[in-house]
Amino acid sequence: MRRLRLPIAVCLFGAFASGQVWAAASSDLLVRMSEAARSVNYQGVIVYRTQERLETLKVVHGVDDGVEMERVQALDGAPREVVKRDGQVICLLPKDRRVTVDKTTPKGLFPALSAERVAQLAEVYEFRDMGSARVAGRSCRALAITPKDDFRYGYQICADAQTDVPLQVNLVARDGVVLEQMKFTEVEFPRSIPAQAFESNLESAPAQQAAQPVQAARVADVPVAGPAAAPAPWQFRDLPPGYRVTMREVRPTADGKGVVEHVLITDGLSAISVFSARREAPAQGFQGQSSMGAMHAFGRLLGRVHITVVGEAPPQTVRLIGESLQPGEAAPSPQSAVAGPAAADGDPDHAVTGP
Amino acid sequence: MAKDSLSALLDGECSPGELDRILEEMDRSPELKASWSRLCVSRDAMEGVHIRKPAIDLCAGVMAQLGERPVSTSARVVQLFRARAHARSYAPSYWKPLAGLAAAASIAAVALTLNLRQDGPAAGSGLVGMPQIASEVSLPAAQRRPRYLQTVSVDADSAEMARRAAMQEELRDYLIEHSNTLADRGMGVTLSYARFAAHSVGEPEAMTISADVTGDQP
């Protein structure tokens, strides 16, 4: 019996080691893919599918002096575009409507994936190398990111073998059912993309301003419930496991008659935004649950404050977060929140985790 | 020409006038009705191979309504109210319109939340053993109604419509803003933008108010 101990131990160690190597390879792929998705020039045609929709879109993504630019253009049906450039996101909608989000995404909301960060993700997700695949005529490596609970969705990603750019992303439920799919049908990776490629032909439509941040807060200022929490606008009574607050900012509402606080909650992959709008007139916002693809929304009124929670997560998670939001002692008022410099800070080290 | 109209109907691009004409033609022409069925089947085949679908097929629901439509009925609103009665048997209680927003009832009646099964996870039912994810890939509640029928309504007053349009716009803006924050996530923002562009057909729409919202109301 003693003779068998060593071989068994060797086998167990080998299995453990190979598992570690496998996990490391998967996380390494995720890290490289994360970087490539932001830094590589690519253009092509994608298909977006849900159970109810099949859309073909043209995509152009480029980086100019470290600044990302993107243009997504619907090829069928009513003309629609989303253009990101010059710190703006411009949405060109049917019936000549145009919405401009005049704000850049604060850096660090989803910090660059490191081995440590992936290890944190591994607490709530399981990574699995799915081997080779072929998408849009190109060789890919496939990775499955499966949630360990029902508070988040998972992903199946095929990344280009040469550039690591994700060519196919499936959003999947915990049971593996695909809820949403984005897939390139043709793609190329030009060395450079002319600026004209990010100019829309539809931009003559009158602009409507959607969001402009005025005041942003350090994540360290975002409170959680508990005796140690400082008095602050809003408190989360409860957050699902793994989720933490990484950003808080305050800006005027689009109609200028109030202020809205935007809090971003993420587990590193899934992200949920909580918008708390306070107006001088009684709030009359969306209430209940709604969805757009796999993006879910939940709205409720809390006194005069209208809460809207939006996220690429199961509706129960979105609702749970919306219902866990409680007023603090000093909710923002229209007078108090329209001054102050924008200073978004998404330093993950300052992230506050819910109880 | 008729088939072109059916394609437009399938894409939700019919004008109210065209919709009237197509519905009348379908009543008269079994062939046209069969073509419509084939188009529905083709669409479903394209979309439904791997991606979860609702248990109740939209096209089947529409066809059922067309089949039930009384020949003598000229007002489609009557038909839609009947259809809504069907929908009630599917809808869980939490999709009931909120009290105090009864002014929207006429819209809700037309809003074919009706044909589409709203068997999503019971809101507030907790997370253990829940996900009925079939409804998780779904349109905003108002968009659940077939787009080609949404123009059939609407006897609500303009103030209510304006309020709902504003509500819709606010939710849309939040979706854009949230999508933008995903740009830095690591899988790129393409999926988020593609999702938004894909679901922006037919804007603007009024948002159907649904669900019983629990929680403190200080």
Image (spheres, coloured by chain):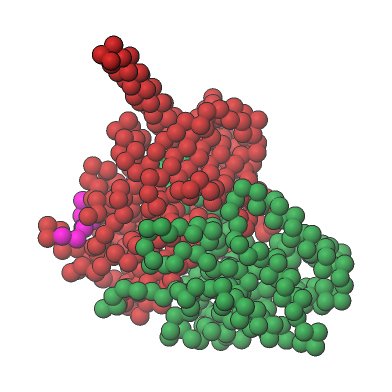
Farthest front residue in view: A1
Q: Nearer the viewer, residue B87 or A67?
A: B87
**Could you tell whether B173 is left or right of B28 in the image?**
left
Farthest left residue in view: A227
Question: In the rendered image of this protein, does residue B186 appear above or below residue A301?
Answer: above
**Could you tell whether A320 is left or right of A138 in the image?**
left
The quadrant in which the C terminus of chain A is found is: bottom left
Q: Nearer the viewer, residue A34 or A217?
A: A34
Task: Locate residue B113, reporting x and y percent.
Answer: 58, 73
- What hue represents chain B? green
- What hue represents chain A? red
Q: Quadrant of residue A204?
A: bottom right
Q: What residue range appears in magenta?
A: A218-226
Task: Locate residue A295, reporting x and y percent.
Answer: 48, 56
Question: In the rendered image of this protein, does residue A273 appear above or below residue A333?
Answer: above
User: Could you tell me which residue is drawn at 65 percent across and 69 percent down?
Assistant: B146
Prevalent SS, magenta region: loop
